[in-house]
Amino acid sequence: MNGSRVDFRIIADWIRPDSRVLDLGCGDGSLLDYLGHSKRVSGYGLEIDDAHVGTCIKRGVNVIQTDLDAGLSEFDERSFDCVILSLTLQAVKYPDRLLREMLRVGTEGIVTFPNFGHWRARWQLGMLGRMPVSSALPHEWYNTPNIHLCTLRDFEKLCRDEGIEVLESEVVDHAHRRRLGLRLFPNILGEIALYRFRRAIAP
Amino acid sequence: MKAIPPDSVGLVTPAQLRFAEPLALSSGGVLVDYDLVYETYGTLNSDASNAVLVCHALSSSHHVAGYHSPADPKPGWWEQHVGPGKSIDSRRFFIVGCNNLGSCFGSTGPASLNPATSRPYGADFPMVTVRDWVESQARLADRLGISQWAAVIGGSLGGMQALQWAIDYPERVRHAVIIAAAPKLTAQNIAFNEVARQAILTDPDFHEGRFYDYGTEPRRGLRLARMLGHITYLSDDIMGEKFGRDIRGGKLNFDYQVAFEIESYLRHQADSFVGRFDANTYLLMTKALDYFDPAGDAGGDLARALRGIKADTLVLAFTSDWRFAPARSREIVKALHDNDLNVSYAEITASHGHDAFLMRIPRYVDILTNYMSRILPGTSA
């Protein structure tokens, strides 16, 4: 993995230099590594997978082996400028609780997830009557870690319900490209959705 | 005679240094002068930037790796991780193992002669703490020309020393590796230690710690203490796996001889401990564990106690360790990230209980190797 991934670049564009970042489900640490080099961010990745933790340690990314479903209780309020949840929201037990936790420990949050409203997913489920399988959703229904898939609209509704203000959003296709069509029909053509948000200021 | 494996540091000889400057102890006592016994493996580089201190736990010593003679049946206590090409690679690092004060393997301790009386210290040997050990190890580092450790590493009580080093000498520790440790003991931990101490203290052969003068030692007490210790070092699962309810000789004899394999194991551990370990040292080591509490001086706030640390830290815990459970390591991790310090934490799945820190578990080896590989810039594992 490298910094040429558009989702990484979008996230980097959204993050202020020298920020303190918490990356939930940081995988092999490539995003934190990229942000460290491009934006001088510091912080920690949380990851449960043994092999990923080993890779993070090898590349010098701070990683704390933990289960996101156990919550973020060991982190104090507002201890990070930004909390990132990259392609992990759909795999956690309590996405709504985790979003609240993100905005407790961080000033801003960034979430990316595979869009279940993408036309190919709609086609496979609606016309073929099969659970969708694609490059963004590569698993079969019986072995997928993704237990809370959602569409762009679903996510935006959850944000409204939770009093979360979306500051910016983007969608990219399976090759992580941004194209005009995506801007016009994000919930149909976007395969990966990216949102930057914060707690809405009470009116 | 069997051949020494090629991935061992090989034959090693302990060294000894005398320290004539008095050491003021946490207890208020003073050690007027003392000896430290240590071993080194590998070569100190020209700018002394590759030195690694390995701190030992309750019953081990400066003999971290290698063999003392070709006939030596057992290598050092951390042979699994220290040697050429191993996680802590003696081809890259200059590795130092130091026997702690109060121990019974060569450094000044209760069995050493008290210069004031020309008799063994016995009960007069002052109580030593983790902080006192760090202070004495710092003096050893001075003498060895090491102004800063590339890493201070230890498991269990050794991990506590690594943490104390990072607190007391922030400029002298680049990395701390804290394995299967805790920021302080729980009431349950202290309770186990107290039972072990009572076993020794109430043994009629203890003679108020002066058993050397009587030509005896509190064997029964020390045996019980060791048996109790071993129960806490193993997990219920590994005990079940290794021994279960297996019966010696296949049938019950309805007497108090060994019936179950676990009884045989504990008795064997106890027997091999007596004769090589000193009862007064056991008392001192368990007290050093009980007293360890860096947060104590910071109003109980561990994050505040760790505020001055500059070292990067790796914290490791083992899933089945109930003596110092992973949650205890997480307390250290939290206090470190509360201070925005570089820290990584890995929880190693292992059934061995607390003893896992001594084992060669593939993922444990990988993590340690990965971490150590980035400690020395310009070299790669």
Image: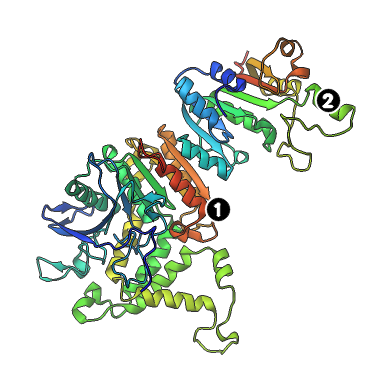
Q: Quadrant of the rendered structure where residue B272 is?
A: bottom left
Q: Which residue is mark 2?
A: A122
Q: Which residue is mark 1?
A: B349
Helix or strand or loop: what does disc 1 sit on? loop
Residue at screen point 22% across, 67% down: B110
Which amino acid, by three-letter code, is at mark 2? Arg
Q: Do the dots labelled 1 and 2 sit on one chain?
A: no
Residue at screen point 57% across, 27% down: A84
**The C terminus of chain A sits in image quarter:** top right
- In this rendering, would B243 be left or right of B339? right
Q: Chain of mark 2?
A: A
Q: Position of residue B362 (x, y in %)?
A: 51, 53
Q: Quadrant of the rendered structure where residue A175 is?
A: top right
Q: Position of residue B15 (x, y in %)?
A: 20, 60
On screen, B376 above or below B317? Answer: above
Residue at screen point 38% across, 60% down: B6
Q: Quadrant of the rendered structure where residue B61 is?
A: bottom left
**The N terminus of chain A sits in image quarter:** top right
Foreground residue, B378 or A127?
B378
Helix or strand or loop: what does disc 2 sit on? helix
Q: Position of residue B92 (x, y in %)?
A: 33, 46
Which amino acid, by three-letter code, is at mark 1? Thr
- In this rendering, would B146 be left or right of B257? left
Work out how far the residue at label 1 is from the one at label 2, CA to CA, in angstroms.
Answer: 41 Å
Q: Which mark is residue B149?
A: none
Q: Chain of mark 1?
A: B
On screen, A203 above or below B154? Answer: above
Crowding around mark 2 (Cα neighbors within 10 Å: few <14, some 14 to 19, many 20+) is: some
Circle count: 2
